Amino acid sequence: MKKTNSIPSIIHELNDNVENYLIDNNIKMRNGASPGLWLCFMLPASVILGTWNHPDCSYFYRTATCLSVGLLLNSLTIIFQVNHSAKFRTACCAVNSATTTLLLSYFSHHNLLFNVLLGVASSFGYNKLLLLALQVSPCSFTFGE
């Protein structure tokens, strides 16, 4: 009989994976704090739900929603792919950039170049700035913050 993993054990394993990733990158989190994975989803989810509940939102809010979907995908990518090679994570980031660009093209009326630049900058920038922020301010934040 095959053993199934429970949700708490999966979350615990993901927390351990992220903690190991942070240790491997010389990142020190606040003492006694877990990585705070749930916080990665809070802001993007609230922006997305705001658009869902108020479909007549402004042009800028729709753009922020497209970027929030990209940030949500980036968070998921980081959490689930921390044990993979840098090449694989870069490929996942490129897919996230393309997804964000497509969403921006469909839901906002920017030109294609702007959409591509915004999609790439938000995806790759998020990945680089997240690590940089955690490295330059040790013991100040959790991963999710």
Image (spheres, rainbow, N blue to C red):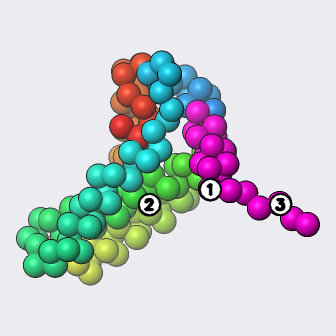
Q: Position of residue 58 (x, y in %)?
A: 8, 70
What is the secondary structure assignment of the residue under circle 2? Answer: helix
User: Residue, x 32% and y 60% (percent of image)?
Assistant: 45
**Residue 140 versus residue 34 in the image, above or below:** above
Number of residues whose C-alpha sits closer than 10 Å to that of mark 2, classed few (under 14), some (14–19) or many (20 or more): many
- Can you tell which quarter of the image residue 74 is in? bottom left
What is the secondary structure assignment of the residue under circle 1? Answer: helix
**Which quadrant does the C terminus fall into?**
top left
Is residue 60 one of those drawn in magenta?
no
What is the secondary structure assignment of the residue under circle 3? Answer: loop
**Which quadrant does the N terminus fall into?**
bottom right
Whether residue 116 is visible here, answered yes or no, is: no
Q: Residue furthest right?
A: 1
Is residue 8 one of those drawn in magenta?
yes
Instruction: Quickly name the residue at label 1.
Output: 7
> Range of the magenta residues?
1-19
User: Residue, x 26% and y 59% (percent of image)?
Assistant: 46
| Main SS category, magenta section | helix
